[in-house]
Image: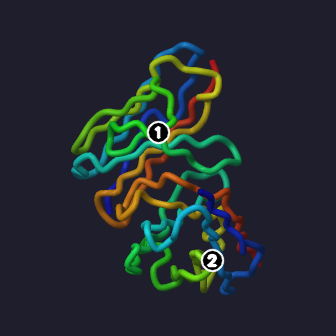
Amino acid sequence: VQLVESGGGLVQPGESLRLSCAASGFSVTNNYMTWVRQAPGKGLEWVSVMYSGGSTHYADSVKGRFTVSRDNSKNTLYLQLNSLRPEDTAVYYCARNFYDRSGPSDVWGKGTTVAVSP
Amino acid sequence: AIQLTQSPSSLSASVGDRVTITCRASQGISSALAWYQQKPGKAPKLLIYDASRLESGVPSRFSGSGSGTDFSLTISSLQPEDFATYYCQQFNNYPLSFGGGTKVEIK
């Protein structure tokens, strides 16, 4: 069971990025899937969840700017980041939840780094 | 949104010490609380879920207790590999939230 994030990088404010989270050893459609981020030197911040049925929830700080989606054929979760701000600079982690539960998250990727700077 | 307040924010302890970290929720969350351990440059690791259930493979020196608004994580005998930052997380209400973290350092 493994999660591998990719897609991070350095962008300017207002630009967009799409993060990917490739899963192996299980299906992303069988579990709730979560994104969590961590700004440099700061604590963990919950970002979003996608239910196995496809419904989503978002943190207020990203609502309307970030969108979670998935490609079942690729067993991959995505996080589309639009209208990026400097405060979105963070390591973004993808995580698997216990089956159809809001929490906890038992399997985590190593993260991908997003830096937003002029 | 539910706020989680962890205390202390940091502590210094010796190998073999008993350590307790507390997490207080701004409103009742039943037992929908998890504890994670994070080491520098690494992803969080699940230790405890549903307030008191030990995740598979986690040493039995870790334990959790509480319900409603007050929770605690106890390490019965601190080991060298336990020096890390610990976070609580509530999953009772959206938006989900984490506590601010407790850094456990070597005395």
- Give the quadrant of the N terminus of chain B: bottom left
Separation of disc 1 and disc 2 at Cα?
39 Å
Quarter residue A13 falls in: bottom right
According to the picture, the residue beneath numbered tag 2 turns out to be A85
Tell me, for residue B56, which label it has, or none: 1
| Camera-nearest residue between A37 and B62 | B62
Q: Residue at x 55, y 51 (%)?
A: A43
The subunit carrying tag 1 is B
The tally of labels here is 2
Q: Secondary structure at mark 1?
A: loop
- Can you give x and y, in whole percent of width and height, for residue A16 in the image? 67, 85
In the image: residue B75, left or right of residue B44? left
Q: Residue at x 59, y 15 (%)?
A: B14
- Can you give x and y, in whole percent of width and height, for residue A67 in the image? 51, 82
Snapshot colouring:
rainbow
The residue carrying pointer 1 sits among few (fewer than 14), some (14 to 19) or many (20 or more) residues within 10 Å by Cα, namely few
Q: Give above or below for B30 relative to A118.
A: above
Quarter residue B48 falls in: top left
Q: Residue at x 37, y 78 (%)?
A: A53
- Can you give x and y, in whole percent of width and height, for residue A56 in the image? 40, 77
Tell me the kind of residue under disc 2. Arg
In the image: residue B81, left or right of residue B58? right
- Give the quadrant of the C terminus of chain B: top right
Q: Give above or below for A90 relative to A117.
A: above
Q: Give above or below for B10 relative to A108.
A: above
The subunit carrying tag 2 is A
Q: Secondary structure at mark 2?
A: loop
